[in-house]
Image: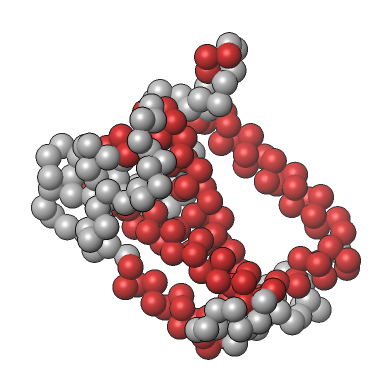
């Protein structure tokens, strides 16, 4: 996958990042719609209430919040993956002898440094355990199995070492929306990277 085209794709992400606004629409601010997706931020013009498959129709507040939790976490992983794809193809910060297309790097790492995967799995397990303790209700009955805590905001696992989380409600909604938009774009970008890497010329721009 040509590096210049990958960089161009990521650079275009700035066109999709919503700009903060001082106008509000009711209590929930300019980035949310009280009648859509349980009032969570992320609803923006021109798409507005974008749910063409009707995945949120008839869903409870708990189910919608669980969907948002999944979307947020997958978006974060995708953003890290995009950076990893672009950086590692020109310079691998951990393994200097891992080279070639990024799609093959994990195979090379698994072959040359098998312990890395076990350490990585342990690290991921610690992170996921913390997320479960932070956000998920203890399944002491069938009623609360696979249920988020009532006071848990989807995606807010308490990790903010730089203190970037705004205290103002509208500013917080704006930041959440920016994260969602970048995460959504990153998930689409990763699908393009995978497709082009496994099926050459399947993505015209890459």
**Where 130 sits versus 121, above or below?**
above
Farthest front residue in view:
53
Residue at position x 45%, y 83% in the image: 8
Residue at position x 41%, y 61% in the image: 182
x and y percentages locating residue 177 in the rendered image: 32, 53
In this rendering, would 76 be left or right of 166? right
Between 136 and 143, the one lying in front of the other is: 143
Determine the image quadrant of residue 87.
bottom right
In this rendering, would 59 be left or right of 144? left
Visible residue check, residue 98: yes
x and y percentages locating residue 135 in the rendered image: 50, 30
x and y percentages locating residue 95 in the rendered image: 77, 72
Farthest top residue in view:
141
**Where 116 sits versus 72, above or below?**
below
How many numbered discs, if any? 0
x and y percentages locating residue 65 in the rendered image: 41, 34
**Where 75 sits versus 34, above or below?**
below
Residue at position x 59%, y 18% in the image: 139
Between 34 and 162, the one lying in front of the other is: 34
């Amino acid at each position: 996958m040509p590096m210049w085209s990958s960089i161009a794709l990521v650079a275009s992400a700035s066109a999709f990042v919503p700009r903060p606004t001082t106008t509000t629409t009711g209590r929930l601010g300019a980035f949310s719609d009280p009648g859509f997706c349980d009032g969570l931020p992320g609803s923006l013009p021109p798409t507005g209430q974008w749910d063409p498959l009707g995945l949120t129709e008839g869903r409870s507040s708990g189910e919608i919040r669980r969907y948002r939790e999944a979307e947020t976490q997958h978006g974060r992983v995708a953003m890290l993956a995009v950076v990893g794809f672009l950086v590692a193809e020109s310079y691998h910060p951990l393994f200097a002898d891992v080279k070639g297309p990024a799609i093959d790097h994990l195979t090379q790492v698994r072959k040359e440094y098998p312990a890395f995967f076990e350490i990585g799995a342990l690290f991921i397990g610690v992170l996921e355990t913390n997320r479960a303790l932070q956000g998920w209700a203890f399944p002491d009955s069938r009623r609360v199995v696979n249920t988020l805590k009532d006071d848990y905001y989807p995606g807010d696992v308490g990790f903010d070492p730089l203190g970037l989380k705004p205290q103002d409600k509208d500013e917080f909604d704006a930041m959440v929306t920016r994260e969602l938009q970048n995460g959504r774009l990153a998930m689409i970008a990763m699908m393009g990277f995978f497709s082009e890497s496994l099926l050459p010329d399947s993505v015209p721009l890459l």
